[in-house]
């Protein structure tokens, strides 16, 4: 199992976020964390990623790729290099073609791929971040609100990509509602 959570307890001061939460995930498939803002969806993703260790209980996990709600792009690198040079430092031609192909699938033109983050829209930055995580060779893919800045066409393309990825790895994503997910096969975990 790439991800097991046992007896997780997490608080922010007096506010209890998780109280004895346990869950065992399959090796692959899509799991959706749903719930109102402030309920702990992002906090759970951060704990799984090892970015927040202030909890009790146990999180047994494997290597993760994480797409934050913030884009976390390097301002001195263009869109294609924010994927290729971050993932592979010295990318091969094949790796650059893979990054370009995925960006193209998500609506980038060759000109767009050369743009720097300050010239990209929020949705474009989101897609660069998604591509970087999708191309990372990790067993777990954590996506924090991945559909939030995508139009209906791009949402459909991302759903298609995620359905394929879910055949070979675990995908855990957060969402405020299930509407953007369409008919994507998934397991829903409600965070109350």
Image (cartoon, rainbow, N blue to C red):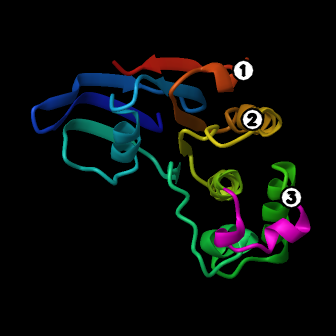
Q: Is residue 118 magenta?
A: yes
Q: Along the polypeptide, which appears first: circle 2 or circle 3? A: 3
Q: Along the polypeptide, which appears first: circle 1 or circle 3? A: 3
For residue 36, side relative to residue 121 (left or right): left
Region rendered in magenta: 109-121
Q: Tag 2, which secondary structure?
A: helix
Please report contact status of discs 2 and 3: CB closer than 8 Å, yes or no.
Answer: no
Spatial CA distance of label 1 from label 2 is 9 Å
Q: Kindly identify the residue that appears in the image at 45 percent across and 47 percent down.
A: 62
Q: Along the polypeptide, which appears first: circle 1 or circle 2? A: 2
Query: What residue is disc 1 on?
Result: 182
Query: What residue is disc 3 on?
Result: 101
In the rendered view, would you say 127 is above or below 92? above
Q: Kindly identify the residue that appears in the image at 74 percent across and 32 percent down.
A: 159
Of residue 50 and residue 79, the one placed in the foreground of this image is: 79
Residue 105, position as x, y percentages in the image: 86, 49
In the image, farthest residue toward the left: 14
Q: Tag 1, which secondary structure?
A: loop
The numbered dot on residue 155 is: 2
For residue 187, side relative to residue 49 (left or right): right
In the rendered view, would you say 26 is above or below 168? above
Spatial CA distance of label 1 from label 3 is 24 Å
Please report contact status of discs 1 and 2: CB closer than 8 Å, yes or no.
Answer: yes
Residue 125, position as x, y percentages in the image: 65, 58
Please report contact status of discs 1 and 3: CB closer than 8 Å, yes or no.
Answer: no
């Amino acid at each position: 199992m790439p991800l097991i959570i046992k007896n997780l307890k997490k608080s922010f001061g007096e506010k209890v976020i998780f109280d004895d939460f346990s869950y065992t995930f399959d090796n692959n498939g899509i799991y959706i964390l749903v719930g109102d803002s402030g309920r702990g969806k992002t906090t759970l993703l951060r704990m799984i990623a090892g970015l927040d260790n202030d909890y009790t209980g146990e999180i047994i996990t494997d290597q993760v790729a994480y797409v934050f709600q913030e884009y976390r792009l390097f301002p001195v690198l263009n869109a294609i290099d924010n994927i290729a040079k971050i993932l592979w430092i010295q990318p091969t031609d094949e790796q650059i073609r893979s990054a370009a192909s995925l960006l193209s699938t998500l609506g980038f033109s060759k000109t767009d791929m050369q743009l720097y983050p300050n010239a990209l829209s929020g949705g474009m930055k989101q897609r660069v971040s998604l591509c970087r995580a999708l191309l990372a060779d990790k067993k777990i893919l954590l996506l924090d609100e991945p559909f939030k800045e995508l139009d209906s066409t791009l949402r459909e393309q991302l759903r298609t990509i995620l359905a394929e990825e879910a055949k070979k790895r675990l995908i855990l994503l957060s969402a405020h509602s299930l509407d953007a997910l369409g008919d994507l096969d998934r397991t829903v975990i409600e965070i109350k």
